[in-house]
Image: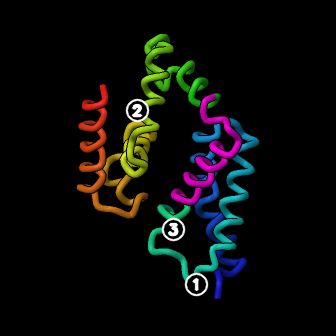
Amino acid sequence: MPLTDREIAELFRLYGHMVFRRAMRMMGNRADAEEATQEVFALAIRARIDTLPDNPVAWLYTITTRYCLNTIRNRKRRRELMDARIEEGWGLPTGVAGAGDVVQLRRLMARADKTQMEAATYVFLDGMTHREAAEVMGVSKSTVTNLIERLRKAVASWT
């Protein structure tokens, strides 16, 4: 039997704010974040799981991340969002990333292993610890460390 309406309502009450914050960070605007939040809980309803996962935070975080990434890809806004984030500085001093840096970053991301990039995104962009990223990804802390190290080695060999 799938999750009940009561269980979904409780998930939303407990974790709706977390899903919204994650969506807001990824989507960049309130309207898209609100839509993403609704869709994430609709996906949770349609998931047809019998019981809540042991870690509902990681489950919802993963659904939110994947939904937002797919939405960005589907809207062909990946470039627009990256350009906007680069202009904002990603928390770095203004002017750090030039046009050549953006092109290089895009090339590296296109060549990188998806799982390695996922780990790097959680750690470097979202500011998670390796342990937190491991929890969200459903892997061990040492796996996250290894993924990031392999990505660093790959990037070093490409440049």
Is residue 2 found left or right of 142 in the rendered image? right
Is residue 51 found left or right of 118 in the rendered image? right
Pair 3/1: label in front: 1
Residue to which mark 1 is pinned = 50
Work out whether mark 3 precedes mark 1 in sequence or the reverse, and give the earlier one: 1
Residue to which mark 2 is pinned = 108
Which quarter of the image is occupied by the N terminus? bottom right
Q: Say if mark 1 contacts mark 2, CB within 8 Å.
A: no
- Residue 89's place in the image compared with 138, above or below, is above
Q: Position of residue 104 (x, y in %)?
A: 43, 23
Residue at x 23% of width, y 55% of height: 142
Q: Position of residue 154 (x, y in %)?
A: 28, 38
Q: Which residues are magenta?
A: 61-79
- Residue 8's place in the image compared with 156, above or below, is below
Residue to which mark 3 is pinned = 56
- Residue 10's place in the image compared with 81, above or below, is below
Residue neighbourhood size for the residue with mark 3, other residues' Cα within 10 Å, grouped as few (<14), some (14–19), many (≥20): some
